[in-house]
Image (tube, helix red, strand yellow):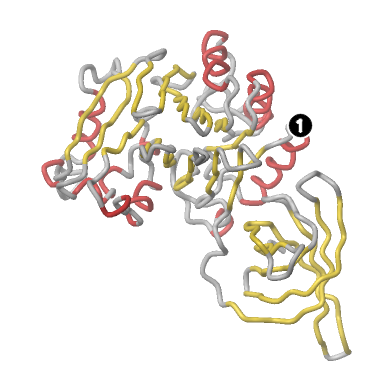
């Protein structure tokens, strides 16, 4: 009997505005866009930030057959959630069909989402208007509490606390449930309860973590965003299984997100920080949730044979220390064979023996786990790390 599998891909994870700062390279700089492929093949796109362009550049029709009718759920109309639309190449292909869902804005009135499309592509803001888009487009307005089905999947919308309004979405598939709650601020009792209902029992709960708890209490209060701590509280109260920290602040460096992730993992068992290229699989045999990180981005790679000592934390949360060989190294990272299974998105201390003018010297590096796969030897895993120090 075939086990139902769903795949959730992260194409953009940054909030407010895209970044190209080298200090944000690991987690990525594109604004919000996620893709969920349900077990029945239904494709959902969550938000249309600049990550949407990346998704479009890798667009493929499943099985080479009929073009899919893709469902696009737009949480709200702020720039960082819609600015990828004009650059989404599949919208310019005639045989594609897209169904867009969002709410009627009190500032725009009827056909709000269609108006947003037209306005950001109107002269003089963009060189071509919507008439250049040949794909079929349908727009449907939703309200908080609305529910509908697409194939075997149930979609529910809930209002979140954000300036000018924002919807969170819950997608229930045969492989598991994903709750997507970007752009929400705690403090409104009714909307706090709405968020908990959205996340109730979810296998994956994606929540806004743009600000630190200290910022949320002081300088960023009222800006419409949340923190890792609030996400942990909601996940715990709602019985969500895995929390994904999302909508990283454009000023948050990779190191700052690392720190946020460490703090969250001290308070909740299963936490990831959303990262561009990350894929989460739901319904895999033996494990309800499996996360995979992309391979190291472009770098000059060379085979190597360095003796090394690696210290880190296992998936089960235990410290380990292991002697090994580094077999593949780049200017940015390495592929290391280990007996221990380290936690994805955890930090490793790697000490390599390198020849020097005065004999063998120790080279101490700090690495960040971005990939785990089957190793070349039985009982080993191949661990991809990006060096941060």
Q: Residue at x 45, y 46 (%)?
A: 12
Q: Residue at x 57, y 26 (%)?
A: 202
Instruction: Give the left or right position of residue 123, taking residue 372 as reference.
Output: left
Which residue reaches farthest left? 131
Give whichever of 264, 70 is nearer the camera: 70
Instruction: Give the left or right position of residue 91, taking residue 384 as reference.
Output: left
- Residue 109 in the image: x percent, y percent? 23, 17
Q: Is residue 33 visible?
A: no
Give whichever of 375, 4 is nearer the camera: 4
Vertical placement of 374 versus 85: above or below?
below
Q: Residues within 10 Å of mark 1 (few under 14, many from 20)?
A: some
Instruction: Give the left or right position of residue 120, taking residue 192 as reference.
Output: left
Give whichever of 126, 76 is nearer the camera: 76
Which residue reaches farthest front? 1
Helix, strand or loop at disc 1?
helix
Where does the C terminus fall, quadrant-wise?
bottom right
Q: Quadrant of residue 360?
A: bottom right
Which residue reaches farthest top? 190
Q: Quadrant of residue 305?
A: bottom right
Vertical placement of 151 versus 147: above or below?
below
- Residue 234 in the image: x percent, y percent? 64, 22
Q: Residue at x 25, y 23 (%)?
A: 140
The residue where tag 1 is placed is 267
Q: Residue at x 80, y 57 (%)?
A: 340
Q: Is residue 126 visible?
A: yes
- Residue 103 in the image: x percent, y percent? 32, 20
Q: How many dots with numbers?
A: 1
- Residue 198 in the image: x percent, y percent? 52, 20
Which residue reaches farthest bottom? 357
């Amino acid at each position: 009997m075939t086990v139902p599998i769903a795949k959730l891909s992260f194409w953009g994870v940054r909030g407010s505005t895209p970044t190209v700062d080298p200090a944000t390279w690991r987690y990525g700089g594109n604004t919000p866009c996620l893709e969920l492929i349900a077990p029945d093949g239904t494709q959902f796109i969550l938000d249309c930030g600049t990550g949407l362009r990346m998704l479009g550049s890798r667009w493929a029709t499943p099985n080479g057959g009929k073009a899919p009718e893709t469902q696009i759920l737009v949480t709200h109309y702020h720039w960082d959630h819609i600015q990828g639309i004009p650059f989404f190449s599949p919208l310019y292909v005639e045989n594609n069909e897209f169904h867009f869902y969002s709410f009627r804005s009190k500032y725009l009135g009827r056909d709000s989402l269609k108006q947003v499309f037209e306005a950001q592509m109107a002269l003089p803001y963009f060189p071509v208007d919507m008439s250049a888009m040949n794909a079929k487009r349908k727009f449907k307005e939703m309200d908080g509490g609305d529910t509908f089905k697409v194939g075997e999947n149930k979609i529910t919308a809930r209002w979140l606390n954000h300036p000018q309004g924002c919807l969170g979405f819950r997608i229930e598939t045969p492989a598991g449930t994903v709750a997507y709650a970007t752009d929400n601020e705690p403090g409104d009792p009714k909307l706090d309860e709405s968020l908990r209902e959205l996340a109730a029992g979810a296998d994956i709960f994606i929540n806004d973590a743009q600000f630190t708890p200290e910022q949320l209490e002081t300088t960023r209060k009222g800006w419409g965003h949340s923190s890792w701590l609030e996400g942990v509280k909601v996940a715990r109260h709602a019985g969500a299984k895995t929390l994904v920290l999302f909508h990283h602040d454009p000023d948050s460096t990779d190191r700052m997100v690392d720190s946020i992730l460490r703090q969250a993992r001290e308070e909740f068992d299963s936490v990831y920080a959303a990262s561009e290229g990350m894929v989460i699989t739901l319904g895999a045999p033996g494990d309800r949730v499996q996360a995979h990180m992309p391979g190291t981005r472009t770098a000059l790679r060379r085979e190597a044979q360095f003796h090394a000592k690696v210290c880190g934390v296992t998936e089960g949360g235990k410290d380990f220390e292991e002697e090994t060989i580094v077999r593949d190294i780049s200017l940015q990272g390495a592929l290391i064979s280990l007996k221990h299974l380290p936690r994805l998105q955890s930090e490793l201390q790697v000490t390599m023996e390198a020849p020097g003018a005065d004999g063998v010297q120790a080279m101490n590096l700090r690495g960040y786990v971005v990939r785990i796969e089957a190793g070349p030897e039985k009982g080993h895993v191949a661990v991809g790390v990006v060096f941060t120090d």
